[in-house]
Image (spheres, rainbow, N blue to C red):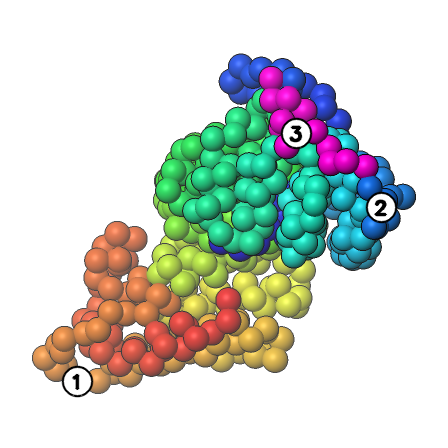
Amino acid sequence: MAVPSADAAAAPPRDAQSAPAAAPARPSEPASAHADAAAPHGAPAAAAAPTGRTDIYPVTLVRRLQRLQDLIAAGSTAGIAQQRAMITEMDVAFGEADPSVWQDPANARALVMYFLGGGNPAVLRDIINREPRPNIDEKLLTGSLLYLEGREEPALRQLGEIDARKLPNGIGGQIALAQAALTVRTDPAKASRLLEVARLLMPGTLVDEAALRRAVLVAAQAGDLDQFERLSGQYFSRFRHSAYAGNFRQRFAAALSRMNVLATPDGLLRLDALLAPLDEEARREVFLLVSRAAIVEGKTALATASAERAMVLAPVASRDAERARVYLSAAQAATPDRYKAAEEALKAIDRARLDPSDQALLEAARRTAELIRRADEAPPAAPAAAPAAPAVVASAQPSRAAQEGEKPSTAISKAQAKLGEIDAMLKEAPR
């Protein structure tokens, strides 16, 4: 499991106080039922001379960081660099703090929230190894560290039975997000519920944004089209300016192409409605991403329709217009009635204006069209056993062609045996 980073999943909460949890989807108990976010280890150790800094105010520092991260969720890209600098400073300050600082339950909660929000887990481990240990539930403390270190099974044993709704909102939202990450592979339905809890406990924060991003992908993995569309619409409406929205759009497009969302007659109209909150540039980007993903998936009709949408939105002679032409021609290069026009269009593409991944796709599409043309011009021959076709030409197979209403070609069948090298090119190309 990837260690949560600042982009993620676990931004420090809006509130580090012991406030009751906001009303979640299911009835909750007041925060006091969990005894200050967790029962302390016992009576504080006997007073001793401090060995570290005592002028540390963790609750205040965490509040400052969470305000910055909320700005990132709202669209501040400059905030990402500021966040890195702030986290570096807080790692040092927290690492130098005297253990007595963490005997205040509010500070101990802020400690856990900070590291779940992007702090260096090695610093947390060093703090935990000191005596007295932070005054917070041992399961929350140790489970959070194990989660940050990527040790999923022991982390789940520590955190799995904790009811995040019974914790104060700030730490509860963070824990629910961590629990969702730990359960998503084994129990996606439970992970979806936990993401909802995280969002309800910390609305408007980076935790809310990250939980919604993840919930969309969980719905996609489950094949729940209604949930996927509903949650995607919420994300585009609420967090379209997030500093992480670009990454979301890429994953959204890949999921969209796999789910056959656009297979219905009104599919493109539904996608238009879904993307309506976005500006023209962002909509164009999504259509380009969908088109490219559909080409790799071998879905010619979807790739063609999305590329055409992108061309309408792209400024004339722009790089995006060039990309749209590449995708449109690549989608048509493996079809029996369009490969000749596609081959000519591909020759006119300025390769230097494309990034490396699209250059590889352009080359693969050119080779596909060329192979099909040669096979079409060759004298008839007995068909040979063919290896699996690469994604860019998958739509040329008779079964795919029949699904998309295209006329199968015997020439295409003959070309299949020659396409293994193109398959390798696509697999090695950067995405």
Amino acid found under the numbered disc labelled 2: Pro
The answer to whether residue 67 is above or below residue 399 is: above
Q: Residue at x 49, y 44 (%)?
A: 155
Q: Pick out the residue farthest to the left.
A: 382
Q: Which residues are magenta?
A: 33-47
Q: Which secondary structure lies at badge 2?
A: loop
Q: For residue 50, which numbered disc appears in the image? A: 2
**Callout 2: 10 Å neighbours few (<14), some, many (20+)?**
few
Dominant secondary structure (helix, strand or loop) of the stretch shown in magenta: loop
Q: Earlier in the sequence, mark 1 or mark 3?
A: 3
Question: Image check: 20 left or right of 405?
Answer: right
Q: CA distance from mark 2 to mark 1?
A: 90 Å
Amino acid found under the numbered disc labelled 1: Pro
Give the percent coordinates (x, y) of residue 128. 65, 47
Q: Which secondary structure lies at badge 3?
A: loop
Q: For residue 42, which numbered disc appears in the image? A: 3
Closest to the observer, 249 or 209: 209
Give the percent coordinates (x, y) of residue 221. 40, 44
Can residue 300 be seen from the camera position used here?
no
Q: Earlier in the sequence, mark 2 or mark 1?
A: 2
Q: Which residue is mark 1?
A: 379
Closest to the observer, 281 or 46: 46
